Image (cartoon, rainbow, N blue to C red):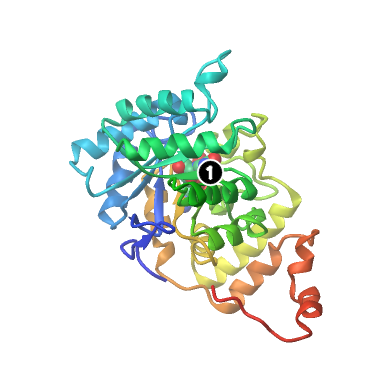
Amino acid sequence: MFGLQSYTTLGRSGLMVSPICLGTMTFGNDRWGSSDEEAQQIFGSYFAAGGNFLDTADGYALGKSEEVLGRLINSAHLRDQVVLATKFTFNTGEGNPNTGGNGRKNIYRALEGSLKRLGTDYVDLYWLHAWDTVTPVEEVVRTLTELIRQGKIRHYGLSDVPAWYASRAVTLAECQGLEPPIALQLEYSLVERTIEREHIPAAAELGMAVCPWSPLASGFLAGKYSGDRKTIDGKSRLEILASGNNPVFEKFTDRNWKILRALQTVAKGLGRPPAQVALNWVVSQPGVTSTLIGARRPQQLEENLRALDFDLPLDVQQLLGETSQLDPATPYMFFEPLLQSRITGGVTVRKWH
Ligand SMILES: NC(=O)c1ccc[n+]([C@@H]2O[C@H](COP(=O)([O-])OP(=O)(O)OC[C@H]3O[C@@H](n4cnc5c(N)ncnc54)[C@H](OP(=O)(O)O)[C@@H]3O)[C@@H](O)[C@H]2O)c1
């Protein structure tokens, strides 16, 4: 494996980031997050270990995550050293569709708010947080290009969008001399591998980085839950959000317990905590550029940063891969070796990347 200071370019850009990005969704969050003192320790440990990539959003803890992160960066005089990313899309009010979504009106409003809360005059990477299903992609690409040209953002990326939407954004930008998105941010872990079908190949083809979020499936893969033990201390995220009607946090399924059992077995054999093995698996998957990790407690971050200290043996990779593989689905089954061999006449053909 490689260390946190083994920087990589973020997609087809000159922005250089650590292979692990510190997600700060827990900062400023009184319900299932970190106290300000814990946030300070988490931030300090990540930076001391060589990390430079920080992720937040205007919607996290109603803007408090940005405020806490901005204070930490500015009081440590680290603005030039860090790659600071935030997001727009989610509505923080009620009854006004233009204080959310991906239209030009909201993007300008949201960015002004984020810059104030972060105490900075630019963000390095501005993420569209999720597809709003209505705004034309042309409006998004043109607005974000304007913001780059005004110096308010350096680059932009797309989170939680269909792969066709990202492809259209890049292609439009190329054809019209606009700025393309340089990265995708998507859920990816041993229990959520859907992006392997469309997004990872699209990103490789279009020069975009892939930044997985929730590599531990919101703590599910840390190994502290089991089919018989779904409560820990009453304070963990999956316990608190269990009945919140948000499918992102519904991790207690039969399929996921099976994958967790395999993870626990191989982790025991390796003498590593399951969280480190699960993170190592995500970080080392083909196409993954920089993985967003989260921590509620400083000890969790310390433990998880050691996920880069080792390589997963081939037999472990194979076992984890097989246990968590996606079910066959059309049309993807046509791209597998069995049906491809009927296209190539039985000859093996490899693509250049
Ligand atoms: N674009 C998007 O839509 C989107 C969505 C979600 C997240 N994100 C970004 O991705 C970042 C990471 O996501 P995530 O926080 O869901 O990542 P994650 O790594 O899957 O989950 C982190 C949580 O797992 C638990 N945990 C972590 N390490 C542990 C350990 N060693 N032992 C026991 N429990 C442990 C902690 O929660 P508990 O202690 O409460 O269990 C921690 O807050 C976020 O901060 C955010 O920046 C983006």
Spot occupied by residue 202 in the image (x, y as percentages of width and height): 59, 58
Asked if residue 36 lies left or right of residue 243, the reply is: left
Q: What residue type is disc 1 on?
A: Ser
Q: Is mark 1 within 8 Å of ligand 1?
A: yes
Please give the name of the residue rendered at 53% of the width and 31% of the height, measured from the top-left corner.
102
In the picture provided, is 126 more to the left or to the right than 5? right
- For the C terminus, the quadrant is bottom right
Apparent side of residue 57 relative to residue 258 in the rendered image (left or right)? left
Q: Is residue 345 left or right of residue 259?
A: right
Q: Taking the image as drawn, is residue 30 in sight?
A: no
Q: Eyeballing the image, is 230 above or below 344?
A: above
Residue 19 appears at what percent x and percent y? 40, 60
User: Few, some or many C-alpha atoms within 10 Å of disc 1 (few <14, some 14-19, many ≥20)?
Assistant: many
Residue farthest bottom in this picture: 347
Q: Quadrant of the N terminus?
A: bottom left
Q: Nearer the viewer, residue 155 or 324?
A: 155
Secondary structure beneath disc 1? strand
| Whether residue 203 is visible | yes
Query: Above or below — where is 346 with respect to 157?
Result: below
The number of discs equals 1
The percent position of residue 41, horizontal first and vertical second, equals 30, 43
What residue is drawn where x is 60% and y is 43%?
Answer: 161
Quarter-of-image position of residue 71:
top left
